[in-house]
């Protein structure tokens, strides 16, 4: 191998190492925020939504808005997506959304508010979406 070829290979390795370091740093900084919600004597965990969960939430809200009908179970969906168990797994499944919707609004808001705040969602999720552009 010529000196030029060896130098080019070393430079490429250095760039690849730097890109791997940057990629590792990116994913290390992208940790989900979480916090406890204490109700009476029970502690629950809520966390911010992942990018995929936020996309799902915003898509569902947008579909209702475009159809001109009130969004259904918005709070319940957000609580379903952002409430976790101690292992970080979702506490609720999609099958639980209707049951969550039947809970007192004041109780659901104990979970909705921190999840929406950590996820960058306003109190009115429709204001976060500009559906006129789509």
Image: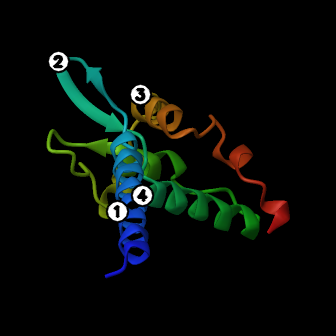
Estimate how packed mark 4 is, as few (under 14), some (14 to 19) or many (20 or more) residues with alpha carbons within 10 Å: few
| Disc 4/disc 1 C-alpha distance (Å) | 38 Å
Pointer 1: what residue?
94
The answer to whether residue 102 shows anywhere in this view is: no
Please name the residue shown 72% across and 61% down the image. 65
Please name the residue shown 49% across and 30% down the image. 113
Pointer 3: what residue?
110
The numbered mark, 4 or 1, whose residue comes first in the sequence reads 4
From the image, state whether disc 2 or disc 4 is nearer to you: 4
Q: Which numbered marker is on residue 122? A: none
Image location (x, y in percent) of residue 130: 78, 55
Image location (x, y in percent) of residue 22: 41, 50
Pointer 2: what residue?
41
Pointer 4: what residue?
19
Disc 3 vs disc 4: Cβ atoms closer than 8 Å?
no
Q: Secondary structure at mark 2?
A: loop
């Amino acid at each position: 191998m010529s000196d030029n070829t060896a130098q080019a290979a070393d430079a490429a390795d250095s760039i690849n190492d730097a890109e791997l370091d940057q990629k590792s740093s990116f994913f290390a900084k992208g940790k989900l925020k979480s916090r406890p919600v204490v109700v009476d004597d029970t502690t629950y965990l809520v966390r911010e939504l992942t990018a995929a969960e936020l996309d799902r939430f915003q898509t569902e809200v947008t579909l209702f808005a475009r159809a001109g009908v009130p969004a259904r179970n918005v709070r319940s969906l957000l609580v379903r997506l952002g409430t976790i168990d101690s292992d970080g797994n979702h506490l609720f499944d999609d099958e639980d959304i209707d049951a969550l919707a039947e809970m007192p609004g004041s109780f659901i808001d104990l979970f909705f508010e921190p999840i929406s705040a950590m996820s960058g969602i306003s109190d009115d999720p429709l204001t976060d979406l500009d559906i006129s552009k789509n």
